[in-house]
């Protein structure tokens, strides 16, 4: 079928229906995308654990490889990781490695355990700026007045001869000592001036926020201050999720957190239902159209059976295409169809009106054939023949200038 004929038959009613279906489908797609995105809590900040017995990890901490940078406070001391055997681990670059056993988010306390290594050795190179924790100070009650750096204890180390083990037994650091020498340590508040240090040499000084003698600690962080948020049952996060700033804010946690999988499932249901509804509309429209056309075809065939005696010629749709040279020469456009110029023979010209299948119910065809077939007058265009080939219908008139008014 030529493009001209297709445009003639596809009327404004069909255009409107298709346009409505396309708009509806687009609306459903946009709705599905919005459903997938309109969730207040980001899934990548969901609470995580290294194992079911270890503490939950959430702001101000974040679990490396499982939570995005904006999920935690922008300080290296709040970045945790999972060890090879699934234990929660705090690693301060180039120095400290501690196992995390418990986190109290409301009181802002954290329990550490030293995993079998020499804590003294780790503390010698500790970067204090990268360690935001400290032992809670007596008489300190308000988190609002936090320190920018945790309180520190200073130690002085000496290297002494191993022959004097008994003399320095109380101060000896076993894991730093060797068979040929021993390392002894004094805190800054200890008086060691009465000791005989003639066989010792100064080794070094260092500062630490935790006691190097312990293996398990309960420490506290003072910044960020999220204790009030936790006490109110709310969450804490960076303001506007901007990891380049250190301001925090409280936010309400929905009772039911919709995860990524649930969001995708909801979006899939919305989109699938929309597609199904669109298909159902299209199928229903097609069924209704087919039913209407079949009823119209039955009505036309019955009329033509009764109309045989008037003897206008009946053409097939293939004849119509041949007569119009495949709808090459368009004469005009009407409400019920398009008129094309045709030729029955070398000297007989006709005008072929191809009726629109999407308009009317066959009444136009029946009325036209019934009335024009009975009229023979010099001033009236004569009906030469017709086509009723399935859903394809056309009327063939003698060719006069007046045919442009059909």
Image (spheres, rainbow, N blue to C red):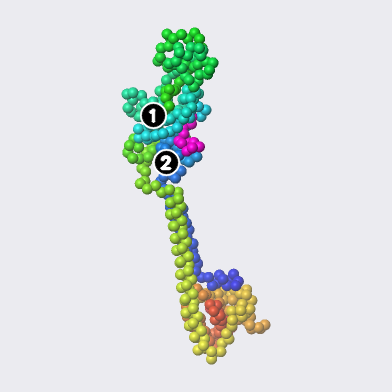
Above or below: residue 403 compared with residue 112? below
Q: Which residues are magenta?
A: 81-92
User: Which of 40/263 is in front?
Assistant: 263
Q: Nearer the viewer, mark 2 or mark 1?
A: 2
Residues at marks 2 and 1, CA–CA distance in whole angstroms = 21 Å
**Residue plotted at (47% across, 19% down):** 173
**Residue plotted at (41% across, 49% down):** 258
Mark 2 and mark 1 residues within 8 Å of each other at the beta carbon: no
User: Looking at the rendering, which quadrant does residue 341 occupy?
Assistant: bottom right
User: Which of 263/134 is in front?
Assistant: 134
Residue 348 in percent (x, y) is at 64, 83
Above or below: residue 380 compared with residue 89? below
User: Few, some or many C-alpha atoms within 10 Å of disc 2 (few <14, some 14-19, many ≥20)?
Assistant: few
Question: In this rendering, does residue 336 appear at all?
Answer: yes
Left or right of 50, for residue 230: left
Which residue is under mark 2? 52
**Residue plotted at (52% across, 18% down):** 178
């Amino acid at each position: 079928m030529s493009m001209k004929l297709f445009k003639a038959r596809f009327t404004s009613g069909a255009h409107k229906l298709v346009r409505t279906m396309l708009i509806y489908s687009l609306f459903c797609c946009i709705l599905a995308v919005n459903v997938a995105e309109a969730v207040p809590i980001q899934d990548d900040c969901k609470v995580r654990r290294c194992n079911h017995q270890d503490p939950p990890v959430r702001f101000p901490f974040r679990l490396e490889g499982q939570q995005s940078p904006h999920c935690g406070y922008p300080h290296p001391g709040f970045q945790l990781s999972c060890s090879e055997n699934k234990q929660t681990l705090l690693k301060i670059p180039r120095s400290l490695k501690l196992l995390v056993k418990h986190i109290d988010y409301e009181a802002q306390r954290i329990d550490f355990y030293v995993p079998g290594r020499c804590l003294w050795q780790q503390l010698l190179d500790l970067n204090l700026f990268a360690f935001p924790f400290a032992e809670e100070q007596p008489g300190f009650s308000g988190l609002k007045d936090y320190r920018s750096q945790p309180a520190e204890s200073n130690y002085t180390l000496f290297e002494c001869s191993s022959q004097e083990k008994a003399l320095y037994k109380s101060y000896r650091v076993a894991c730093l000592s060797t068979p040929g020498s021993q390392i002894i340590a004094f805190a800054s508040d200890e008086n060691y001036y009465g000791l005989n240090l003639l066989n010792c040499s100064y080794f070094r000084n260092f500062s630490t926020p935790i006691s190097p003698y312990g293996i398990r600690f309960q420490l506290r962080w003072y910044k960020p201050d999220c204790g009030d948020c936790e006490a109110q049952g709310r969450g804490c996060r960076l303001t506007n999720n901007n990891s380049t700033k250190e301001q925090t804010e409280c936010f309400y946690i929905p009772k039911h957190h919709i995860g990524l999988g649930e969001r995708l499932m909801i979006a899939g249901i919305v989109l699938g239902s929309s597609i199904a509804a669109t298909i159902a509309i299209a199928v229903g429209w097609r069924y209704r159209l087919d039913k209407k056309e079949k009823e119209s075809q039955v009505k036309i065939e019955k009329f033509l059976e009764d109309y045989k005696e008037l003897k206008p010629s009946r053409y097939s749709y293939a004849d119509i295409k041949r007569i119009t040279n495949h709808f090459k020469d368009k004469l005009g456009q009407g409400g019920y169809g398009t008129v094309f110029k045709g030729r029955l023979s070398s000297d007989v010209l006709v005008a072929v009106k191809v009726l629109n299948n999407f308009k009317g119910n066959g009444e136009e065809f029946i009325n036209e054939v019934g009335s024009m077939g009975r009229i023979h007058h010099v001033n009236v265009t004569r009906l030469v023949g017709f086509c009723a080939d399935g859903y394809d219908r056309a009327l063939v008139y003698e060719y006069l200038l007046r045919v442009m008014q059909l």
